[in-house]
Amino acid sequence: MLFMRFFATFLYVVFIFATANSKEFRIDFSDEGMKLLEKRGFGKKTVYTNNKDDKGWYLKAEAEKSATGLGMEISKELLNEMPFLNITFKIEKDFINIDQKTKDGHDWTARIMVGHGKKIGAKLVSLAHSSFLEEGYLQQSPWTKGSRDYVISNDKSGKWHTRKINVRELLEKTHGISFTNFIAIFSDSNNSKQKIIAYYRDIYFSSE
């Protein structure tokens, strides 16, 4: 239910830039980009803050009994040219002993959501980090029939790490669609009531 309510009320905004020569479409975490981002959630809010180091801008997500996302509307044609989604993140504080296959444990320290976001009949995939499930694990959300959880990281190093996923193929496999009309960052802990901290950077679509 959380996903459906989220997409029913989410105000999408667009602030991403493309470099046509390299066939990349990036999310911007700079100060200017953050000014245009709206966040939506229910109850206590996940706190998102941006900062910069020698490698550029990044986003910090801190959730404690909260469920809030940051999202952007994107062109449904994007995956035709750039089907890969590149995600770099690190986990500072993860969950302790939760079962993410159940409703009570269905929280994710770091995840990127894509798919067909709409009020009724949404078809979503969460590209998630999990310390408990192996990379490649795929399940239907215990909350929402139209949502799938796909574990892309089981990295417990606490360091930055990158994953590249062919989201067009994944959406075709899970929902029979070959497009996404949005991308959202969503760190949540509203079910488990724990506190988590994650970081995101260099999130972009690419042609290869």
Image (cartoon, rainbow, N blue to C red):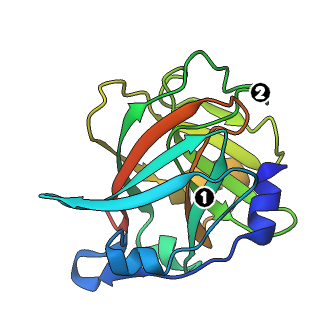
Left or right position of 119 against 7 = right
Q: Say whether residue 67 is left or right of residue 103.
A: left
Measured Cα–Cα span from mark 1 to mark 2:
19 Å
Q: Residue at x 64, y 53 (%)?
A: 45
Find residue 129 and report its horizontal and vertical position in percent: 48, 36
Q: Which residue is mark 1?
A: 69
The amino acid type of the residue labelled 1 equals Gly
Q: Secondary structure at mark 1?
A: strand
Q: In terms of image quadrants, where is residue 55?
A: bottom left
> Height in image: 126 above or below 77?
above
Residue located at (36% from left, 68% from top): 29
Residue drawn at x 74%, y 48% as measured from the top left:
147
The residue lying toward the viewer, choosing from 155 and 199, is 199
Image coordinates for residue 154, horizontal then vertical, percent: 43, 27
Three-letter code, disc 2? Asp
Q: Residues within 10 Å of mark 1 (few under 14, many from 20)?
A: many
Q: Nearer the viewer, residue 35 or 185?
A: 35
Q: Which residue is mark 2?
A: 104
User: How many numbered circles are shown?
Assistant: 2
* Image x and y of residue 172, in percent: 63, 56
> Which residue appears farthest toward the top when viewing the image?
97
Residue 149 horizontal side relative to residue 70, left or right: right
Residue 194 position in % (x across, y down): 61, 29
In the rendered image, the residue lying farthest to the left is: 54
Identify the element where label 2 is drawn.
loop
